[in-house]
Image: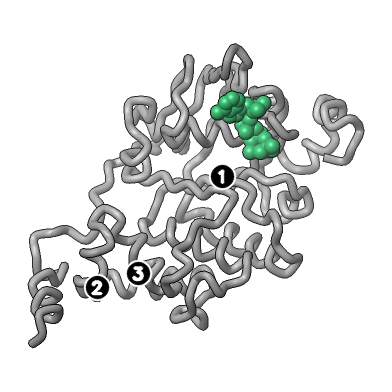
């Protein structure tokens, strides 16, 4: 047995005291709400990017956030994920987990996954390895390369590959994927950690029409098991996935409801200067 094989054997995760799953807190969703945001304000040099914003997201729902450039959509995701501190307000994960008390890595660990607009996959690694690395970010790259996957982990990656529709590309270098496929891989990397909430910022920007359609199917299929919050400017896409749409304007909620009610809302029409929202 070579050194590397011995090392692998020694570190077999299913044989060691290391737990391969992350320990997750109990999230109390007995009131159906998984994310409570109340009176949230953030200012940058006196400018209020979020202004006493109130927002409630139900467990398992797929919510779309829309709003003009600068409305505060990304800032809101930054506060939820611990990237940006707020001036006042509260953000609760379920009934009793105060997210404002936790750091950015801790919030990710608690089960809130964030996808930024630009795909950030490891181009020189295969699709499979990218998913493998995302399972083990807390163990480091060295550990991932020397340790064998447990059956449960390997099954989990196969399941994610099926969900994101990249089974055929499993051994392809991530750098060789199309833009849309990279976005799906990155969503898969979040899914590998089995998040309760997925926050996804502008997923279809730069995608072909076919990729956009496929992304709509993917996000729709994730709702229920996960809570999905999507920020998007592409209104056709929003219409195709949204049950409830929240419109942000100047850091606060301007309107909320079905896509039809939003499109006929006079305040929304005025803010969009008569353009079709
Ligand atoms: N780190 C920062 N420093 C200073 N100002 C900021 C910072 N982040 C955001 N802002 C400002 O806060 C406001 C809200 O920005 P935010 O990025 O949240 O908007 P958005 O709704 O995501 O817009 P877009 O649709 O263009 O992505 C903008 O006026 C922006 O310039
Ligand atoms: Mg933004």
Q: CA distance from mark 1 to mark 3?
A: 23 Å
The quadrant where residue 246 appears = top right
| Rendering quadrant holding ligand 2 | top right
- For discs 1 and 2, the disc positioned in front in the rendered view: 2
Residue 151 or 205: which is nearer the viewer? 205
Q: Which mark is residue 229?
A: 1
Q: CA distance from mark 2 to mark 3?
A: 10 Å
Mark 3 secondary-structure assignment: helix
Q: Is residue 131 above or below residue 66?
A: below
Residue 100 or 145: which is nearer the viewer? 145
Q: CA distance from mark 1 to mark 2?
A: 31 Å
Give the x, y percent position of residue 2: 10, 85
Query: Residue farthest to the right?
Result: 274
Q: Is residue 5 above or below residue 139?
A: below
**Mark 2 surroundings within 10 Å by alpha-carbon count, few (fewer than 14), some (14 through 19), many (20 or more):** some
Q: Is residue 182 visible?
A: yes
Q: Are marks 2 and 3 in contact (CB under 8 Å)?
A: no
Give the x, y percent position of residue 216: 65, 60
Q: Are marks 1 and 2 in contact (CB under 8 Å)?
A: no
- Compared across the picture, whether 199 is left or right of 261 comes to left
Give the x, y percent position of residue 79: 48, 30
Tell me what residue is drawn at x 56 percent, y 31 percent: 75
Q: Earlier in the sequence, mark 1 or mark 2?
A: 2
Q: Which mark is residue 156?
A: 3
- Compared across the picture, whether 147 is left or right of 200 comes to left
Q: Are marks 1 and 3 in contact (CB under 8 Å)?
A: no
Q: Which mark is residue 166?
A: none
Residue 92 or 135: which is nearer the viewer? 135
Residue 247 or 5: which is nearer the viewer? 5
Residue under label 2: 149
Tell me what residue is drawn at x 33 percent, y 74 percent: 155
Q: Cβ(mark 2) to ligand 2 < 8 Å?
A: no
């Amino acid at each position: 047995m070579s050194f590397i094989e011995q090392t692998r054997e020694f570190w077999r995760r299913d044989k060691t005291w290391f737990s391969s799953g992350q320990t997750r807190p109990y999230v109390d969703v007995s009131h159906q709400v998984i994310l409570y945001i109340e009176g949230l304000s953030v200012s940058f040099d006196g400018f209020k990017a979020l202004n006493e914003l109130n927002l409630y997201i139900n467990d398992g729902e797929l919510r779309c956030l829309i709003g003009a450039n600068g409305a505060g959509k990304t800032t809101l995701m930054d506060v939820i994920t611990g990237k940006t501190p707020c001036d006042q307000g509260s953000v609760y994960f379920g009934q009793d987990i105060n997210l404002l008390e936790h750091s950015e890595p801790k919030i990710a660990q608690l089960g809130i996954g964030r996808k930024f607009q630009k795909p950030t996959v490891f181009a020189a690694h295969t699709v499979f390895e990218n998913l493998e690395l995302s399972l083990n970010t807390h163990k480091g790259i060295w550990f991932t390369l020397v340790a064998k996957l447990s059956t449960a982990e390997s099954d989990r990656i196969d399941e994610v590959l099926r969900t994101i529709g990249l089974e055929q590309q499993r051994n392809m270098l991530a750098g060789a994927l199309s833009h849309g496929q990279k976005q799906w891989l990155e969503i898969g990397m979040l899914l590998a950690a089995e998040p309760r909430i997925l926050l996804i910022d502008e997923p279809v920007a730069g995608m072909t029409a076919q990729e956009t359609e496929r992304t709509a199917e993917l996000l729709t299929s994730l709702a229920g098991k996960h809570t999905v919050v999507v920020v998007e400017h592409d209104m056709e896409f929003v219409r195709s996935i949204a049950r409830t749409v929240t419109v942000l304007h100047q850091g606060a909620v301007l309107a909320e409801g079905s896509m039809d009610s939003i499109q006929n809302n006079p305040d929304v029409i005025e803010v969009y200067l008569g353009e079709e929202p």
